[in-house]
Image (cartoon, coloured by chain):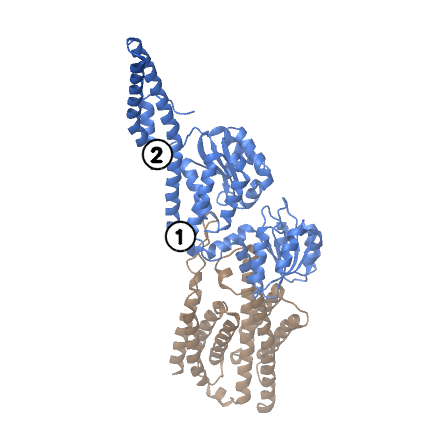
Chain colours: A brown, B blue
Amino acid sequence: MIVTLHLIVLALYGLATALVLAPFTGLRPAPSTLPPPPAPRAPPRVLVIAFPCAGAAVHVVAISQLTLVGLGPALSMLALCLVLLQLTSERLLRGSAVSFFTAPLATGLVGLALLSGLTPSAEAIAARNIWFVLHVALSVLGIALMALAFIAAALYLLQFRELKARRFGQIFQLFPPLERLDQLNRFALVAGFPALTLGVLLALGYGAQFSGGLHVAKAQVVWGIFTWVVLGWAVWVRVVRHWAGRRAALASIAGFGAVLLVYVALKLTQPGAERFL
Amino acid sequence: MTGQTEMGGGIKVVGVNHRTAPLDVRERFAHGAHEVPRALARVMAAGASGGVLLSTCNRTEFYLVADDEPALEAVWSLLGERLPATPAAGAREYGYIARDRDAVRHLYRVSAGLDSMILGESQIQGQVREAWEASRAQAGPVLHRLFQTALHVGSRVRTETGLGMGTASAASAGVAVAGKIFGDLAGRSALILGAGDMAELAATCLSDEGVQITLVANRTQERARAIAERLGGRAVSLEEAWPHFATTDIALCSTAAPHAVVTWERVGAVIGARGGKPLCILDLAVPRDVDPALAQLENVFLYDVDDLQTVAAQATARRRDEVPAAERIVEEETDLFWAWYGGLGVVPAIKELRQRIDELRATELERALRHLGHLSPEDRARVEQFSQALLNKFLHQPTIALKTAAEQGHGYGLLEALRRLFGMEPPA
């Protein structure tokens, strides 16, 4: 049942991805001597909203049947968080540009979740309680918000490049204004940091309360703290140092890139990494 | 029809436009209103009998009534002198020539907005009128008629088709671009450099979006004050405006200065003090008001007329559906003008034919009367009346046929036949 629901989710997210990326296929800039082509036509708004909404609804049902333990369920939940954040930010931004990144990313994450397996071991299920579920949920939310900050930053840099280069193609037409992307980046970082901090604190509390100390892989601790520090730094430069615009976008991308890089490196090199996400 | 009339040659248009020349070349070729009479005088001295110079940010075109070579050479030479390093082909490299009916059609298309970078834009009609008025003394009757009808064509196209629908000017494109930087423009600040029509139009577009016009800077204060009073803000001199580049969100530049006024030296350091805060500069002037080097500053988004017209052109893509209807009007009006213009060639031909046959009549009458010396003066007068009546009857049908054919725009064939049959020389 869980797998079937995830397959439905995968199909709906896949359709949403195809729809949002459609304007970018088959259009090339016209030679300068000819009149420019008409503005790219966005896909029907109702479908752009309907597919991820339907996907998210099915996804919520699927997630409710999961134990939230193990890599597959965590990736699935991350995908759902991303789609929900996408729908929220689209409402705020009055545009569908965030979905250019979130739609394929969520589709990929659901695909990976299916490949990783969605049923955890009996030992993992036994360890599950409310502290643990909250820790996973808040940590995943924090990471999803950080990914959203990264997406907003990437959109910002793309739009910035087009505006500086005076190119007025699909990106100029379809992406939101720089100011709004900057605001989204700031919002995602500022909201993501408390969520991730709480997630880390809950992990510490869970360890002390139920496991008689922190019995987790060293790699997981290193990555969790590193992620927290990087996100903290990104928030600090935005809120305290008042970085904005391109510099803040670059900081977000660098931070998110570093987190991903360190995760991959630890997964590949550290013993016990199989327990870690 | 060759388009040659007794009024000094055929109709020609020679010039450059946004399709054939880049902005930096067009701005060199642009003529201010004060330069028009002298430029036309030079071309007319080379043999043109009439001339109108249409110079906008998108085109510099000489409309001439002239024989081919000398006058056209004069135009290329005049434009070529404005190039810094003359290419092998001179100004010709960027230009085009249209003759006779094609020249008429070209002006009609220009006036209708069919040849504009922003399809169907209406500003060109005012520019055609201004060009005609600025060249009135040198236009001559053919070009007077041509420009008068061109304005009529522009009006017809705009009222009878949807070619002018929607807002698609460089000014509105400027608002769209600023919106892509700042999002909501309400509450943003803008300073305006220049107080011409374009500056006022663009400032109005910004003001309509809720942008606060803080300053209107111009060399002459009177006009700046009028705009400032209407849109808010205060009128200042250009020199007073430079420090405000540190705080304003949008700078709209549309002065008539012949060179860049917003230079690195004047505002580079001031913009550097903004601390990364974005500045959108809309340069609507030709020649450009803003030193392109300022775009190198990370927080400066600089757009010139070409950029904004590209944006506007995208927005007006749907106007393309109206092009066939507009082209039909242009063709109809071209036919009408050409019929009128063809009539100009027919009238002198008829006059010449009548004169020639009348000379024959007089010669033959005189010869006949020498052999009829017995006739009374009354009879001699009757014979003369008879010859005159015969001449009139003889010429009546050809005259009517020629005039009718000319009015229908195909008098050329009959005119040629007439010239051959009666050994008449074509006009020089």
Whole-percent x and y of residue A254? 59, 67
- Mark 1 secondary-structure assignment: helix
Position above or below: A110 against B161: below
Amino acid type, label 1? Glu
Tag 2, which chain?
A: B
| Point 39% across, 36% down: residue | B340
**Which residue is found at the position 49% from the left and 51% from the top?**
B122
Where is residue A55 shown, x and y percent of the image?
Answer: 42, 76
Task: Please say if A186 is above or below B311.
Answer: below
* Label 2 secondary element: helix
* Res A129 label: none
Q: Quadrant of residue B280?
A: bottom right
Q: Is residue B123 visible?
A: yes
User: Could you tell which of marks 2 and 1 lies nearer the N-terminus?
Assistant: 1
Drawn side of residue B379 relative to residue B179, left or right: left
Tell me the residue that label 2 is attached to: B406
- Residue named by callout 1: B160
Up-down relation of residue A70 to residue B185 (above or below): below
Q: How dense is the environment of label 2, judged by Cα within 10 Å: few (below 14), some, or many (20 and up)?
A: many
Image coordinates of residue B295 in percent, x first then y, are 61, 54
x, y percentage for residue B401?
30, 31
Q: Amino acid at mark 2?
A: Ala
Q: Are marks 2 and 1 in contact (CB under 8 Å)?
A: no
Question: How far apart in space, not on screen, are marks 2 and 1 (Cα)?
Answer: 28 Å
